C-alpha cells in the first residue's frame, strides 16, 4: 500500500486489510520543506506501529520527481502537475511491489478530498497493466471515509498537514492564509 501521509493511511489501512496482508510503503518525494517530510514520515511510522502492519520506506527520488513535473509547476491543484506527480508515485509503488514479489498495490491518495480519484484509478490501472500486477481501485474517502479519517487522526493525535506536499501546494496554502512567500520556509533542494 503506497502511503502518501498518515491521515490518509488511517482509513486506508482499515479498509484495505480485507484484501490481505498489508505492507505500508511511505513514498512521497514531493514533500517540502525537509522538516515537513520528516514529520510526515515519523507519523506514518507511528501509525503503522499502532495498526501493527509491516512498514517500509526508501529515500525518495527527488530528481526523478522534479523531472516528472518539470514544465508544469504553474498548474493548479488537480492539474497536469498533480497528475504527473501521482503517476510518478504510483509507478514507484508498482516497481517496489514487483521487486518484493507482491501481486497488487493500492494507494492512500484516494482518501484525500483534494485529489482527482478517477484519474488516480486510471493511472493505477495503466501502471499495473505495464507491470503485470493488480491495482486495488479503492476510493477511501467514500462511504464516510473522510469522517472516519478525522475520527482516527483525532483518536491517535496524528498530525494533519495543511497542504499536499510540494512547494507549489505550500505556496497556494500560504496565499490562502495571507502569508507572503518570503515569510515561508526555504525549499529543499
Image (cartoon, rainbow, N blue to C red):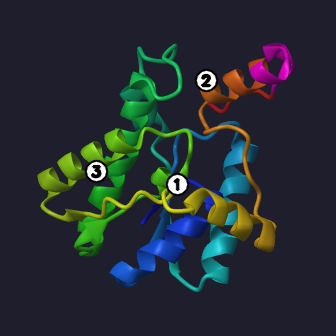
Q: Nearer the viewer, mark 3 or mark 1?
A: 1
Quadrant showing the N terminus: bottom left
Which residue corresponds to the image point at 27% horizontal and 57% vertical from the top-left? 95
Q: Is residue 181 magenta?
A: yes
Image quarter of the C terminus: top right
Mark 1, other Cα within 10 Å: few <14 / some 14–19 / many ≥20: many
> For the residue carrying disc 3, how many other residues have a C-alpha within 10 Å: few (<14), some (14-19), or many (20+)?
many
Q: Which residue is mark 2?
A: 168
Where is residue 169 shown, x and y percent of the image?
A: 62, 28
Q: Are marks 3 and 1 in contact (CB under 8 Å)?
A: no
Q: Disc count in the image? A: 3
On screen, 155 above or below 87? Answer: below
Circle 1: element type = helix
Q: Secondary structure at mark 3?
A: helix
- Report the residue at 12% width, 61% height from top: 132
Tell me which numbered mark, 3 or 2, is placed earlier along the sequence: 3
Distance from the alpha carbon under mark 3 to that under mark 1: 15 Å
Return the disc, 3 or 1, that comes first in the chain's sequence: 1
Residue designated by label 1: 111
- Residue occupying image coordinates x 69% and y 73%: 46
Q: Which residue is mark 3?
A: 124
Residue 140, position as x, y percentages in the image = 48, 60
In the picture shown, does residue 122 fall above or below 187? below
Is residue 57 inside the magenta stretch?
A: no
**Which label sits in the foreground, 1 or 2?**
1
Magenta stretch? 176-184
3 vs 2, front mark: 3
Amino acid at each position: 500500500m503506497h502511503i502518501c501521509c498518515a491521515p490518509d493511511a488511517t482509513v486506508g489501512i482499515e479498509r484495505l486489510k480485507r484484501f490481505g496482508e498489508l505492507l505500508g510503503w511511505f513514498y512521497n518525494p514531493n514533500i517540502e520543506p525537509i522538516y515537513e517530510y520528516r514529520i510526515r514520515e515519523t507519523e506514518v511510522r507511528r501509525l503503522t506501529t499502532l495498526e501493527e502492519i509491516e512498514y517500509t520506506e526508501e529515500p525518495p527520488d527527488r530528481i526523478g520527481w522534479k523531472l516528472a513535473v518539470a514544465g508544469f509547476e504553474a498548474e493548479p491543484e488537480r492539474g497536469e502537475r498533480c497528475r504527473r506527480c501521482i503517476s510518478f508515485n504510483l509507478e514507484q509503488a508498482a516497481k517496489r511491489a514487483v521487486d518484493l514479489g507482491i501481486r497488487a498495490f493500492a494507494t492512500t491518495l484516494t482518501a484525500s478530498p483534494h485529489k482527482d480519484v478517477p484519474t488516480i484509478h486510471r493511472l493505477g490501472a495503466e501502471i499495473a497493466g505495464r507491470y503485470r500486477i493488480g491495482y486495488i481501485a479503492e476510493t477511501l474517502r467514500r462511504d464516510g471515509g473522510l469522517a472516519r479519517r478525522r475520527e482516527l487522526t483525532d483518536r491517535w493525535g496524528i498530525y494533519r498537514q495543511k497542504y499536499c506536499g510540494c512547494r507549489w501546494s505550500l505556496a497556494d496554502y500560504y496565499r490562502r492564509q495571507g502569508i507572503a512567500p518570503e515569510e515561508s520556509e526555504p525549499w529543499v533542494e
